[in-house]
Image: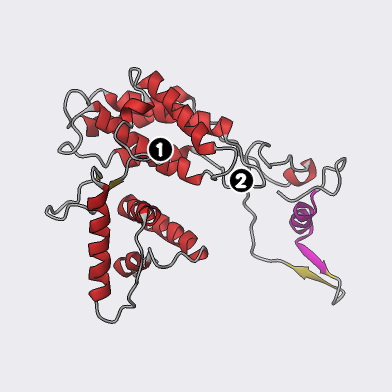
C-alpha cells in the first residue's frame, strides 16, 4: 500500500488522487491549465484486513465505494467441501487409503492456517501471500494419484507432503530465518495430529534431501497412453531421462541447441515446470511461464514453449 503523508495523517496521496477522479470525474492538468475528464471508466478494488504491510485506508476514500464483505468459511465447512471432492476419487483405492479423504482435507487446512499465521509478508518477503487457492492446489495435486502406483497410506502421505512442499515451501527464502525448517516443523506436527502419529523422519526415511521432500513427476514412464504421476525412486534414472530428452531436443532441426549441465537443482526445477504445465489451466501456465521469463531463466522452459506454442 502507498505510504501515508505522515504518521498522524490517515491520507494516502495515490488513493486521494483516485478519490478526486471519483468525485469530480477527472483531474486538473496544471501544464495546460485545463480540466481533463476520464470517461467510460469504472473502478473496482479489493482489499484484505490490515496486517502484513496492509494499512487502514482513509474513511473518506472508502466511503466512495459500495462495500461487499465476504467472510472466511469455517474450517468445518472447508473440510466438508474438500472431503467431498476427494472421497469419490479415493473410493477406487485399497481399503487402507479409502478413509483418508477427511484426514487429507483436515491436514491441508490445518497446515494452511499455520502458514498464514506464522509466515506473514514483510517488505523483504512480500510474496508470502497465501489463500484458499493454495489449499485447492494441494488437493488438486493429490487427486493425480492412481491406484496402480499408490497402494499404502504412507505413499499417499508422501504425495501430500510433496504437494505441500511445492505449493508452500517453494516460496520461502533461504536465509538466516530458516523458514523452510520452520515449515517442516509445522508439517511434522500436522502429520502427527491427522495421520495417526505419522512422523516426518519415518515418512522421509529414504529421501536424500528431507528439506526438499520427495520428487514426483509424470514423464518417466512412456509405455502407457496416460502418463502416471508417480514418485521418482531412483534419482539416476530421472537424470538419465532428462538427459535423453535434452539430447532428443538438440537433434530436432531448426532448433537452437542447448548445451545444459543438468545438475540436481536444474532437474528439480524441470520437475516443477512439468508439474505446473501438466495439471494446470492455460492461464496458470501462462502466469508461471511469465515469471520464469521475467527472471531470464529461458533455457529450461524453452522446450515447454515448443510443446505449447499458443500458451507461452
Q: Is residue 259 above or below residue 180?
A: below
Residue 264 is situated, as x and y percent measured from the top left of the image, at: 36, 53
- At x 20%, y 39%, the residue is 146
Residue in front for this viewpoint, 45 or 219: 219
The disc, 1 or 2, on the residue closer to the chain's N-terminal end is 2
Secondary structure mainly formed by the magenta segment: helix
Decide if residue 21 is on the left or right side of residue 177. right
Residue 25 lies in the magenta-colored region: yes
Residue 237 is situated, as x and y percent measured from the top left of the image, at: 22, 52
Q: Is residue 254 above or below residue 68?
A: below
Decide if residue 238 is on the left or right side of residue 116. left
Residue 53 is situated, as x and y percent measured from the top left of the image, at: 68, 42
Q: Would you name the residue on which mark 1 appears?
A: 164
Residue in front for this viewpoint, 282 or 275: 275
Regarding residue 164, the answer to whether it shows in the image is yes
Q: Is residue 306 above or below residue 18?
A: below
- SS label for mark 1: helix
In the picture, which quadrant includes the C terminus? bottom left
Residue 272 lies in the magenta-colored region: no
Range of magenta residues: 12-28
**Label 1 vs label 2: CA separation?**
19 Å
> For residue 125, which numbered disc appears in the image?
2
- At x 42%, y 26%, the residue is 188
Residue in front for this viewpoint, 191 or 264: 264
Amino acid at each position: 500500500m502507498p505510504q501515508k503523508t505522515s504518521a498522524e495523517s490517515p491520507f494516502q496521496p495515490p488513493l486521494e488522487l483516485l478519490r478526486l477522479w471519483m468525485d469530480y470525474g477527472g483531474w486538473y492538468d496544471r501544464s495546460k491549465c485545463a480540466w481533463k475528464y476520464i470517461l467510460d471508466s469504472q473502478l473496482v478494488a479489493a482489499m484484505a484486513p490490515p496486517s502484513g504491510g496492509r494499512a487502514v485506508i482513509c474513511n473518506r476514500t472508502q466511503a466512495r465505494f459500495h462495500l461487499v464483505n465476504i467472510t472466511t468459511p469455517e474450517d468445518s465447512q472447508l473440510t466438508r467441501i474438500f472431503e467431498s471432492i476427494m472421497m469419490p476419487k479415493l473410493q477406487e483405492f485399497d481399503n487402507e487409503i479409502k478413509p483418508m479423504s477427511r484426514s487429507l482435507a483436515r491436514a491441508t487446512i490445518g497446515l494452511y492456517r499455520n502458514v498464514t499465521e506464522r509466515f506473514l509478508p514483510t517488505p523483504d518477503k512480500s510474496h508470502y501471500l497465501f489463500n484458499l487457492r493454495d489449499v485447492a492446489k494441494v488437493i488438486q495435486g493429490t487427486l493425480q494419484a492412481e491406484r496402480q502406483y499408490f497402494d499404502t497410506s504412507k505413499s499417499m502421505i508422501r504425495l501430500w507432503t510433496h504437494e505441500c512442499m511445492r505449493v508452500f515451501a517453494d516460496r520461502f527464502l533461504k536465509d538466516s530465518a530458516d523458514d523452510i525448517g520452520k515449515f517442516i516443523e509445522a508439517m511434522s506436527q500436522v502429520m502427527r495430529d491427522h495421520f495417526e502419529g505419522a512422523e516426518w523422519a519415518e515418512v522421509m526415511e529414504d529421501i536424500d534431501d528431507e528439506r526438499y521432500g520427495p520428487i514426483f513427476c509424470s514423464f518417466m514412464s512412456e509405455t502407457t497412453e496416460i502418463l502416471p504421476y508417480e514418485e521418482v525412486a531412483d534419482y539416476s534414472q530421472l537424470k538419465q531421462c532428462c538427459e535423453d530428452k535434452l539430447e532428443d531436443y538438440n537433434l530436432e532441426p531448426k532448433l537452437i541447441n542447448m548445451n545444459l549441465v543438468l545438475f540436481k537443482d536444474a532437474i528439480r526445477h524441470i520437475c516443477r515446470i512439468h508439474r505446473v504445465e501438466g495439471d494446470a489451466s492455460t492461464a496458470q501456465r501462462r502466469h508461471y511461464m511469465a515469471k520464469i521469463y521475467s527472471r531470464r531463466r529461458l533455457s529450461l522452459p524453452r522446450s515447454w514453449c515448443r510443446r505449447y506454442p499458443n500458451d507461452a
